[in-house]
């Protein structure tokens, strides 16, 4: 496969070359910083194909006004054969209109690069993305689904942009909830041994998913722990039950095509004294002190509440309303305290950290980011840490809320949803809105064969392209791309945005931008196709004109290639028939 520079990168390089020339001419000082120079499509397509702010951001260094500098830049750009027009707009923006051959060459670039079109080398760093990390107390439910898909799609996006990605799952196996899990498993263990356990007691997990766990425990241990004291079996049953839950969670995630590289245990973290090490770092920086936790605000404290001296993190320095304890009064680590140590551990092996959290954790973001910054900088490293918040999904069936799953006892399982509508429908639907926006998932609408269903509309575009190529009777051919006119080149312009969108989405850590782009590309293709229904001369297959047919088929094939590449980032398969 040949190494080729995609269109937007090529013209960014040409702008850079013009600025080099202006430095040699003395118009710009030598080594003028260009970090804020952009080359991208204008917001209004009628203004041209590309726009640059170079004159706006560099005029001060050139000791001139932006329009005067823009005129000098335009003088150079006008000599470029691929630039049909270079115009100065407003206070000094430069709009470019590209010659048709520039777009035709981009079609060739898509064909030449194939599955690699849109890939970038901009990353070059190691990024740890932690996502899902649900408590190991039951099967995955739809409350976890959106964050799981967003996290996994982000990993795919970062890999396309050249980052080395570690997909990590943090197993919360050290808190009180796993003790409850062990007691729930012990109850099912007794049931498997023939005991009538009656109704599940309040406070234990009621779902049927623990029945197989109890059966396996009964097979392994017989009646050894049936009537034993809790202290004899709690740790053992906790270990076995967590292992069984993690196996179940891995199976559920696999239904979505999600596989993590690393599973980190909170219990192992604490056994290795990582929280103590983190506390020592933060004390050294003056960010942890021993103080008395304030009584709960806005209401009378509980009768048994007493002021207790605890190690507190100075989170008020970072916008929090009070300093937060890293330990409980019984000496156990708080979730926040353990989380500090966990992120400190991750930062030892990565250049950047990203966490995908539910929106209900928004209040924790500032203090955990501040603590991690203090820890990493204290250790001589500056490791950027970003938290992406994901809103819950409301499940509907024909507009009515969906009832809970019998298997879980309290929620709708992810497996139930994937088995009903399919992995690809679930994954793509979860990316059709920004993660921090509310979302409704209606079982009827996500499988509806209509333009209003973005999953169907996109998949139908790819299937329509594949069907056309299969039935045409003429092979796609690039020999006569000069036969492609303005309508066809408009479709090329849309597809050619892909490499730029990949890089912008990766920088912003926003995989939904890829889904939005694919929706726009599918709409552009359907519009192009439908034009042929009104005007036969605009149809892809032209009877009696095999050269034009072959050129339009080549165009359609490359649009299909871009759709496949975008879907590959999102972990969605491109269908060939519908």
Image (cartoon, helix red, strand yellow):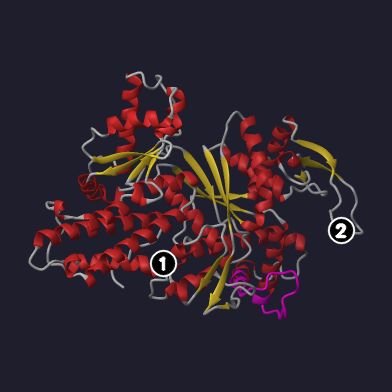
Mark 2 residue crowding within 10 angstroms, few (<14) / some (14–19) / many (20+) = few
Indicate yes or no whether the magenta region holds residue 305: no
Left or right of residue 367, residue 212 in this image = left
Give me the C-alpha separation between circle 1 and circle 2: 48 Å
Q: Residue at x 23, y 40 (%)?
A: 82
Relative depth, front residue between 284 and 497: 497
- In the rendered image, which quarter contains the C terminus? bottom left
Which of the pair 136/122 is nearer the observer?
A: 122
Q: Nearer the viewer, mark 1 or mark 2?
A: 1
Tell whether 238 sits left or right of 158: right
Q: Quadrant of residue 385?
A: top right
- Tell which of 287 and 188 is nearer to you: 287
Which residue is most to the left? 544
Q: Which residue is mark 1?
A: 454
Where 230 falls versus 269 (above or below)?
below
**Number of numbered discs visible in the structure rendering:** 2
Q: Residue at x 65, y 47 (%)?
A: 365
Write down the residue under mark 2.
299
Mark with earlier residue (1, 2): 2
Q: Residue at x 79, y 41 (%)?
A: 311
The magenta stretch is: 191-213
**Coordinates of residue 522 in the picture (x, y in percent):** 34, 62
Q: Residue at x 53, y 38 (%)?
A: 349
Quadrant where the N terminus is found in the figure: top left
Q: Position of residue 410 (x, y in %)?
A: 64, 73
Magenta segment's dominant SS is loop
Q: Is residue 270 visible?
A: no
Q: Is residue 434 left or right of residue 454?
A: right
């Amino acid at each position: 496969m040949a190494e080729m520079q995609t269109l937007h990168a090529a013209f960014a390089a040409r702008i850079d070359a013009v600025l080099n020339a202006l430095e040699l001419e003395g118009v710009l000082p030598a080594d003028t910083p260009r970090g804020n120079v952009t080359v991208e499509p204008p917001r209004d397509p009628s203004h041209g194909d590309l726009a640059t702010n170079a004159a706006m951001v560099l005029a001060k260094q050139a000791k001139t006004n932006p329009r005067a500098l823009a005129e000098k830049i335009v003088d150079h750009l006008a000599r470029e054969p691929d630039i049909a027009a270079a115009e100065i707009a407003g206070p000094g923006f430069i709009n470019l209109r590209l010659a048709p051959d520039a777009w035709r060459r981009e079609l060739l670039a898509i064909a030449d690069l194939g599955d690699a079109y849109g890939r970038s080398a901009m990353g070059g760093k190691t990024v740890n993305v932690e996502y899902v990390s649900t408590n190991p107390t039951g099967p995955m439910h739809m409350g976890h689904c959106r964050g799981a898909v967003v996290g996994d799609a982000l990993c795919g996006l970062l890999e396309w942009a050249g980052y080395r990605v570690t997909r990590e799952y943090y197993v919360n196996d050290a808190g009180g909830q796993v003790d409850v899990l062990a007691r729930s498993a012990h109850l099912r263990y007794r049931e498997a041994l023939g005991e009538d356990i009656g109704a599940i007691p309040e406070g234990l997990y009621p779902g049927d998913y623990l029945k197989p766990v109890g059966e396996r425990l009964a097979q392994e241990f017989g009646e050894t722990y049936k009537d034993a004291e809790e202290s004899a079996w709690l740790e053992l049953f906790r270990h076995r039950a967590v292992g069984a839950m993690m196996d179940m969670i891995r199976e559920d995630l696999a239904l979505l095509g999600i596989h993590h590289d690393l599973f980190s245990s909170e219990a192992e973290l604490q056994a290795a004294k990582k929280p103590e090490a983190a506390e020592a770092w933060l004390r050294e920086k003056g960010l942890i002190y021993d103080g008395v936790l304030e009584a709960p605000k806005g209401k009378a404290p509980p009768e048994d509440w007493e002021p207790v001296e605890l190690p507190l993190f100075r989170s008020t320095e970072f916008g929090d309303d009070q300093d937060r304890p890293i330990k409980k009064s019984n000496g156990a680590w708080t979730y926040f305290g353990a989380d500090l140590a966990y992120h400190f551990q991750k930062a030892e092996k990565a250049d950047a950290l990203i966490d995908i959290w539910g929106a209900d954790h928004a209040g924790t973001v500032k203090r955990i980011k501040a603590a991690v910054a203090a820890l990493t900088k204290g250790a001589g490293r500056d490791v950027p840490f970003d938290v992406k918040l994901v809103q819950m999904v409301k499940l509907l069936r024909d507009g009515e809320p969906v009832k809970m799953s019998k298997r879980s006892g309290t929620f709708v399982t992810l497996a139930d949803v994937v088995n009903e509508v399919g992995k690809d429908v679930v994954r793509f639907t979860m990316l059709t809105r920004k993660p921090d926006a509310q979302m409704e998932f209606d079982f009827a609408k996500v499988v509806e064969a209509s333009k209003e269903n973005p999953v169907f509309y996109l998949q139908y575009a790819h299937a329509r392209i594949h069907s056309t190529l299969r039935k045409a009777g003429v092979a796609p051919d690039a020999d006569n791309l000069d036969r492609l006119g303005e309508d066809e080149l408009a479709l090329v312009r849309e597809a050619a945005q892909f490499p730029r969108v990949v890089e912008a989405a990766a920088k912003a850590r926003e995989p939904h931008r890829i889904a939005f782009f694919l929706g726009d590309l599918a709409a552009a293709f359907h519009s192009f196709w439908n034009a042929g229904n009104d005007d036969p001369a605009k149809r892809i297959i032209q009877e009696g004109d095999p050269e034009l047919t072959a050129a339009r088929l080549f165009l359609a094939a490359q649009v299909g290639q871009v759709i496949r590449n975008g879907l590959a980032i999102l972990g969605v398969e491109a269908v060939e028939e519908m």
